Image (cartoon, rainbow, N blue to C red):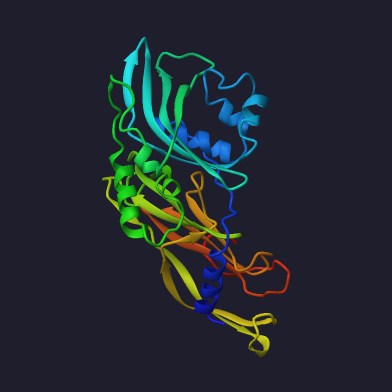
């Protein structure tokens, strides 16, 4: 069975129901990021984390707050442009928000309104440090698409918060290329995870300051046991492009030509470039992206890759394949430029 047949199996898998869990997100770097983190915590049932994003408790106690979500399956959220206003050593942000709450019985409710957030001047704070937090929320029931009910602006004062032009460019490129091929709700697709990635080129001197690229991971599709991601990379000048990942093309030979049988031979016959990865994660400490694609639910057949960020781009350094549908997890390393002797 060649890689094209394997890919066909994976595509069939990805058409199943959406069961993958949201990746952990805990980011207070901006009002938008904090609101995404709040609903990420709610979707992951991490109610203590969600509760502690508020300066003033949103319920009489954590138990009451959690009880308010007992019939909620998940929440989708989009945010608008925040405004910022300084007062008494703090910056107050007001940000438009629209959410769609899906109940455990499948019914949906839409809400829109404004959140107020506060950041005390980090330069004058002591310990314990108080990060950006939510002061209050004012949300009302609404009807329609989230993009239609999202308030144009919150508050009557303040200046627009500094626009993240690189993020805006990444969102625009993603929507232009994948709007018709990625099937998740718009609010999921338009809120990527964002990473500031430090690096240097090999020709930089030892005292050259770290350069910085930005990596964005967008959700694209989910199936019963696989989740697809698209990565966009902004270089140090802010130019954004789609990341293509070198991937081995395999020729797998089975006993009697049956994929349920024993693997007789497996070899790399070339390389392709993939713009989507399955069940992937980025590790900022090691500057690596890893993926693990299950070919069926039990996970006994799969492929896994590792790409490392160096010289301003991602390079394939390791690839493993378990091509046998034998009920056992026994991957074979077909490429390894990463593991030392």
Q: Quadrant of residue 264?
A: bottom right
The residue under the point 67% across, 26% down is: 63
Residue placed furthest toward the top: 88
Report x, y in % for residue 142: 43, 35
The residue under the point 55% across, 46% down is: 22
Residue placed furthest toward the right: 327
Please indicate whether residue 12 sits to the left or right of residue 158 in the image.
Answer: right
Circle count: 0
230 or 142, which is in the foreground?
142
103 or 61, which is in the foreground?
103
298 or 12, which is in the foreground?
12
Report x, y in % for residue 273: 41, 68
The residue under the point 55% across, 22% down is: 58
Residue placed furthest toward the front: 143
| Residue 162 visible in the picture | yes
Please indicate whether residue 215 sits to the left or right of residue 305 in the image.
Answer: left
Please indicate whether residue 8 sits to the left or right of residue 214 in the image.
Answer: right
Where is 276 relative to 25, above or below? Answer: below
35 or 202, which is in the foreground?
35
Report x, y in % for residue 69: 61, 34
Q: Quadrant of the N terminus?
A: bottom right
The residue under the point 59% across, 30% down is: 49
Q: Quadrant of residue 341?
A: bottom right
| Residue 122 visible in the picture | no
Report x, y in % for residue 253: 60, 84
């Amino acid at each position: 069975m060649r890689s094209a047949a394997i890919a066909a199996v994976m595509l069939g898998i990805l058409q199943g129901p959406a069961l993958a869990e949201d990746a952990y997100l805990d980011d207070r770097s901006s009002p938008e990021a904090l609101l995404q983190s709040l609903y990420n915590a709610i979707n992951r049932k991490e109610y203590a984390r969600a509760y502690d994003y508020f300066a003033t408790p949103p319920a009489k106690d954590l138990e009451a707050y959690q009880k308010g979500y007992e019939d909620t399956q998940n929440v989708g959220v989009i945010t608008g442009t925040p405004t910022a206003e300084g007062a008494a050593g703090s910056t107050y942000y007001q940000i438009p928000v629209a959410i769609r709450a899906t109940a455990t019985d499948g019914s949906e409710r839409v809400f829109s309104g404004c959140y107020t957030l506060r950041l005390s001047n980090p330069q004058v704070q002591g310990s314990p440090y108080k990060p950006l937090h939510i002061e209050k929320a004012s949300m009302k029931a609404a009807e329609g698409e989230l993009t239609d009910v999202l308030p144009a602006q919150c508050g009557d004062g303040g200046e627009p918060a500094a626009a993240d032009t690189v993020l805006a460019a990444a969102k625009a490129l993603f929507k232009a290329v994948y709007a018709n091929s990625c099937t998740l709700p718009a609010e999921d697709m338009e809120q990527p995870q964002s990473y500031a990635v430090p690096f240097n080129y090999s020709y930089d001197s030892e005292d050259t300051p770290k350069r910085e690229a930005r990596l964005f991971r967008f959700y694209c599709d989910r199936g019963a046991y696989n989740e697809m991601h698209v990565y966009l990379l902004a270089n140090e000048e802010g130019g954004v492009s789609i990341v293509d990942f070198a991937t081995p093309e395999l020729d797998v030979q089975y006993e009697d030509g049956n994929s349920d049988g024993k693997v007789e031979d497996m070899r790399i016959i070339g390389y392709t470039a993939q713009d989507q990865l399955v069940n992937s994660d980025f590790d900022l400490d090691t500057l690596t992206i890893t993926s693990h694609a299950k070919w069926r639910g039990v996970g006994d057949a799969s492929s896994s890759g590792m790409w490392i960020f160096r010289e301003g781009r991602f390079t394939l350094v390791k690839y493993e394949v378990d091509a046998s549908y034998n009920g056992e997890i026994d991957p074979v390393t077909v490429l390894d430029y990463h593991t030392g002797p």
